Amino acid sequence: MSLIQSDLLINQPRIRHLFCTREGGVSSGVYSSLNCGFSSADDADNVRANRDIALGQLEIPGAQLVTSKQVHSAKAVYIGTPLDKIIPEADGLVTNKPGLALGIITADCAPILLADTNTEVIGAAHAGWRGALGGIIESTVKLMCDYGATIENINCAIGPCIGRESYEVGAEFMDKFIAQSDDNNKFFKPASISGKFFFDLSSYAFCRLENMGVSQISQLDFDTCSDQDRFFSYRRYMVNSEEDFGRGISLIGITDK
């Protein structure tokens, strides 16, 4: 099973994290093989098995997985106990409770994992363009601070997401960002087709974090769209008119040991 980790988070004594690739699961076909998304048409038993496989790699004994209904919002919620049947609509999760594993489901959007190195408050955010523009990163960091984190002690990893050279967008898309700030122009590069641009989602997320005062940030240099062997991708599914697409999972938790 192929796992990806950030040097900024891997050395924290009780913090465990990972960004999963699509390898090492039980699903087949377009979902091969570690598909962790129930919103796909994959067999639900396979998705549950894949989530269990991923959770086992986190190395937190007895960990309870917590995910949300991700809706590309700016809403972050605190999780104090394992969830049963009530799954919140949110794109940011925060906890300070050992034994809970916060999970973010993605297929091109940026999974962002955060941890305060002193207070062991952790966070996870699902940052697509809409959520990032709307403020999901700020909402997640602010909620972490509400529970004892401090900006200067937050370490953050921006996980594998769609790369700039794969993220071609139109002028109307770019205008949404320029309307927020002229400085956002730097995240767009003209494409060879007139009126088209390439958007750098990971660097945009980095800038939003930096503007909040977070200084310990790592960007993991992967392109989920172009790297078909390792990652699922919504953009690739659309471009190639594939039948469906799988979703990857990123996890962060606190261990008792």
Image (cartoon, helix red, strand yellow):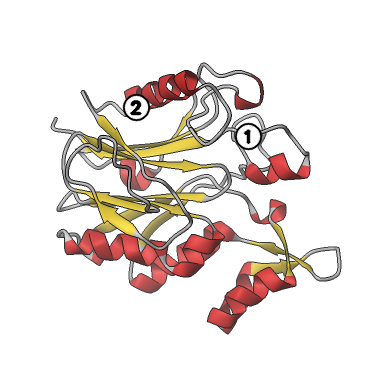
Q: Position of residue 69 (x, y in %)?
A: 41, 46
Q: Is residue 199 visible?
A: yes
Residue type at the position of mark 1: Phe
The residue at which mark 2 appears reads as: 55
Say which residue appears at 66% left-offset and 26% top-offset.
30
Q: Secondary structure beneath disc 2?
A: helix
In the image, residue 119 above or below residue 21: below
Residue type at the position of mark 2: Leu
- Image quarter for residue 241? top right
- Image quarter for residue 181? bottom right
Say which residue appears at 18% left-offset and 64% top-offset.
146
Q: Position of residue 27 (x, y in %)?
A: 55, 19
Which one is in front, 254 or 175? 175
Mark number for residue 245?
1
Say which residue appears at 39% left-offset and 57% top-offset.
217
Q: Position of residue 33 (x, y in %)?
A: 56, 22
Q: Secondary structure beneath disc 1?
A: loop
Which one is in front, 214 or 136? 136
